[in-house]
Structure formats: structure tokens, C-alpha cells
Amino acid sequence: MICERVGMAGFVSRIHFEADVTHLRVCSLAGAVPLAHHCWIVTDLTDGSGAELQPTYLERDAVASYLSGAEEASEESWTRAHTEYLRRKDLPHAARCIFWLVLDLFNRGEWARGSGWLARGLRLLETEQDCASLGLLSVLASRQYLKQADTKGAAEAATRAFDLARQFDDPELAIFSRLALAQVKAQRGEFTGALRLFDEMMVSVTVEDVSPIAVGVAYCAVIDACRSLFDFSRAREWTSALSRWCAAQPDMVAFRGKCLVHRSEILRFSGDWAEALIEAGSAYAWSDAHPNSLKYPAGAASYELAEIHRLRGDFAAAEAAYRRASEHGQMPEPGLTLLRLAQGKPEIADATIRRLLKEQQGRVVRVAVLNAAVEILAGAGDVIAARAAADELAGIGQAYNAPALTAIVACSTGVVCIAEGNIGAALTELRKAWTLWQELDAPYEAARVRVLLGQVCLQLGDDLAAELELDTARRVFERLSAEPDIARVDALQRRSHTSGAGAGGMTGRELEVLELVAEGKTNRAIAEQLSISERTVDRHVSNILLKLHLPSRSAATAYAYQHDLIRSGG
């Protein structure tokens, strides 16, 4: 039998075993025990005389190949092990090999081949008594039903798997059946129950003796689920655990790319943008270096890179990264739309966000689109459309007990209330958002809310409170190198010295339009100067007259001069 030892530097040793192979350890199969720094991968599964080894060695080779990123070799070994178990008429073990094979195929998005193997496995066990392998295949059937939007079928399959796990006390089936049930509950909107099952599953992962594949799949599935349920605290906790697990197994390829992407997301959320940039870059480099590994696409890493570049004001790098994300199959929105807004192209951002609002998106993306829509539409003066987006966002938020989503909803509602001139309601919503972001240790989001609070305080004539809010936010932005936000704070502080208490609840853009109206410019001239459409200018002028309770442009001009809203040299 020929084995290869793959070291950290890629060094490969070939050893010929002719003696007793029953003590050979191909790799550690205990999820709680890290893989050694060197991993044995069986490449010639004979005992020297040409006879086949026990199928257990083929299974171990499949696991080792999987963890090292050799997908084709892993698939071949699972298939050979399956065939050998069939030859021995051991149908439960043959079906269990199919489970691991189909799990890999489904994770790679190869649903057609995976479904074919799954059907084969279920047929194999039709004449068998219930067994743990049937439970594992039921887990995959539940996942297949969920993909087909058949929640009832998914629930029945997951429940069957869970019952078989209790009957046979199989640790891996216990983990995967809880995962299947949790995913069904999440799909049904039973979020508290789903999270409880996820927590139970992860406790099992840390204490049970299970395959490292089960460990890695469980970590990634739970982190993805927490993100989709907007439970950023749990996502942060389990991402840290996944990072430690991956770091303890330096030769492992599987799961490492996704781990890096998750780490980048969490670091960005936690305000460590410099480290997040490094991790996102590493994730992209990892994907490039392992094109045939498990499909955790480079698109997610590219999108993370783009987001950080955009927030830091490196627009050229952000543009390139969003394009790379799109090339790798990752939707570049709404980040790319927000980039257009930051680049001073509000009309492009406005048109794109209106298109996105008409399209169907997954829940997580939809929340991001609605949040961006509120910012863009309120800034464009379309208060009615901004309110509609905020109300839809609030409807989603009502279904979850998630502090992060509640904070997003409160902030968006506050933005719309400012645009509507309802300053009291805006203050209430923004204070709620700021408190939640503080509790979640999300410094950038908290600082963005403080800027809005500063804007509200300016409109209330409380210049001292506004100064405190804006100065505190600016210090956070300086630490993060968030250049666009620093510029926004500076502009607000400059405006506060001339606007005083006569701003009348107007937004910054409305103050700009009012100043140009007072200078005698037509709507067309204002549109050209601000690079916006005449329709948008019309909306701004209407909002100004409504907020100030004025009958005409000439009255608005008089108001601007009376309240010293015209900059010198304007």
C-alpha cells in the first residue's frame, strides 16, 4: 500500500506499507482533536499483494482528501468504499458513504448528481430496518425539500432524522438532524426554536467524537444561519470558534476560505477595518490558489474588499473589487449603488435602487437594499418612496427578535422622520438605534447614528449637543479611516455655523437647494449645478415650502436671508 504524507510546506513523502495495516491512522476522525501537522493520504489502497483494503481505509482516505481540498479524490474514495460495502452486502454502511458523497455534492451546488445519489441511497435501504444511515439520508432529503420550497416535506424528513438519531444514539446523526430541524424552523419563521437547536448542535460538535467534516459543516451552517437571522452576536461567537478550529489544523484546506470571509465580515462589523481588509484579501488569495476546492467563491471575499474600500473612500479599489465580485457570481449590490452615491452620482444611485426595489431578493440582501434605499431616496427628496422602503423594512424586522435588525429599522425610520420634519420621532428612533449598536459593539454603525443625532440637534437649535455628537462620531471615523464620513461631519459642522436654528427641519440637500433658490437660480440651473434631475429639484423645493410653511419661492428666498442661510460669497 502506498501512502503520501503532505506537510505544511507541500513536502510529500511516499511510504510503502507491506506489514500489518490495521494500525494505520490515515487522519484524525475526532472533531475535538486537531489534525496533525502532517496528514496521511492513501494513494494506493492495496496491501502489497493487490488485494483491496478494508472499506474503512477507503473512508478515511476520502475524509483526508476532502480536508486537503482534493474533491475528485475524495469522491472517488467514497464511491469505492460504497462499492466495497455493497460487495459485502453491508447496505447501511454503503448508504452512509452515499451521505458523505451527497453532502459534498450539495455543498458544491451539484444538485442533479447529488439528487441521483440520494435516490440510490434511499432505494438501497427500502428493504432494510430503520438505521442511522437512513436518518442521515433523511437529513439530505430535508435539505432537498427546502431547496424546492417544500417546507412540509422538509419538516417530515427532518423529524424522521431526529427520531432516528434518538433511537440509535448516533452522534453525527444527532448533529445533522438538529441542523435540518433548525433550518426548517428558520424557514417557518420559528426563529427562537431554530437558534436553540443551533446552540444544542454546536455543543454536540465540541464534545462528541465525530468526523472533522461534520465539525466544519456544522460551524459553517450555523454561522450562515445566524447571519440570515441577523443574529450578529452568535455569528461573531461561532466565527471565532471556527477560526480557532481552522488554526489548529494548518494543513486543512476545506472550510478555511469560508472561515476567512466570515472573519473579515465580523472584523468589519467590529470596527477593525485594517485587519478585515487583510482577512478579505487572504480569503480572495485562498480562493485563487484553490480553484478546485470546495466552492466558497471568491465573490464573497471580493464583495468584502469592496465594502471596506468604499467605506474608507478608496473608490477606485472599491469599483474594481465590486466588478471582481460580479465576475465570481456575487451580486455587487447594494454596495455598488452606495458607491455611486458616494462618488457624487446620485441620479445613477437613484435609478439603480428603484430597479432593485422592484426585484426579488433573499431576506438578507433585501434588508440591505431597503436600508440603502432609505438613505438614497430620502437624500433625493422622495420622502414618500423612502417611507415606503422604511415601512417594508420595519415589517421584516417585526418577524425577528434580533437587536441588529431592530437597530437597522430604527435608524432607517429616523432618517425618514428627519426628511418628513418629524424631529421628535426621529430623535426617539435614533436614540434606540444608537443604544443597540453600542450594545452590539458596532462602532461604525453607532457613529453613523450619532451623525444623524447631531443633525437633529442642529435642527432643534441645540448647537452644544450637536457638537458633542459630531465630534464623537468624527473620532470614530478617524480611527477607522472612514474618509467619506469625516467629510460629511466636516460639512455639517461648517453648515451649523451659518444655519443656526432657522433650518426648519430641512435636510442638508434641501438647505443647498434653498440657498440656490435664494440666489435666483431656476430649477434647471440648480439641477445642473448639483448634478441631479429637475424632477428631484422640484421635490426638494416642494419639501422646503412644506416644511417652512411658505407659499412661494420668493417667500423661501426671504426666509433664507432672514435666517442667515446664505453663505458669504454664494
Image (spheres, helix red, strand yellow):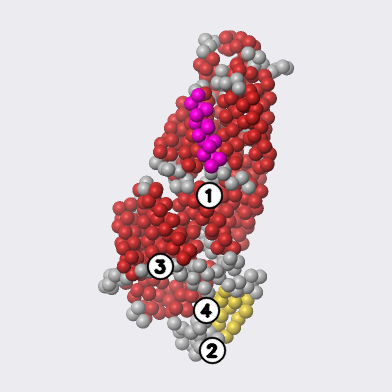
Q: What is the secondary structure assignment of the residue under circle 3?
A: helix
Q: Which residue is mark 2?
A: 18
Q: What is the secondary structure assignment of the residue under circle 2?
A: loop
Quarter of image, res 362: top left
Badge 2 amino acid: Glu
Precedes in sequence: disc 4 or disc 2: 2
Precedes in sequence: disc 3 or disc 1: 3
What is the magenta range? 424-439
**Residue 447 picture location, percent across and down:** 60, 36
Residue 527 makes an appearance in the image: no
Badge 3 amino acid: Pro
Which numbered marker is on residue 171?
A: 3
Badges 3 and 1: C-beta atoms under 8 Å apart? no
- Decide whether the magenta segment is chiefly helix, strand or loop: helix
Q: What is the secondary structure assignment of the residue under circle 4?
A: loop
**Residue 16 picture location, percent across and down:** 57, 85
Q: Which residue is mark 1?
A: 330
Residue found 27% across the figure and 72% down from its top: 129
Badges 2 and 3: C-beta atoms under 8 Å apart? no
Q: Which residue is mark 4?
A: 25
Tag in front: 2 or 1: 2
Badge 4 amino acid: Arg
- Location of the C terminus by quadrant is top right
Question: Label 4 neighbourhood size at 10 Å, few (<14), some (14-19), many (20+)?
Answer: some
In reply to whether residue 408 is colored magenta, the answer given is no
Badges 4 and 2: C-beta atoms under 8 Å apart? no
State how far apart marks 3 and 1 are (Cα).
35 Å
Quarter of image, res 163: bottom left
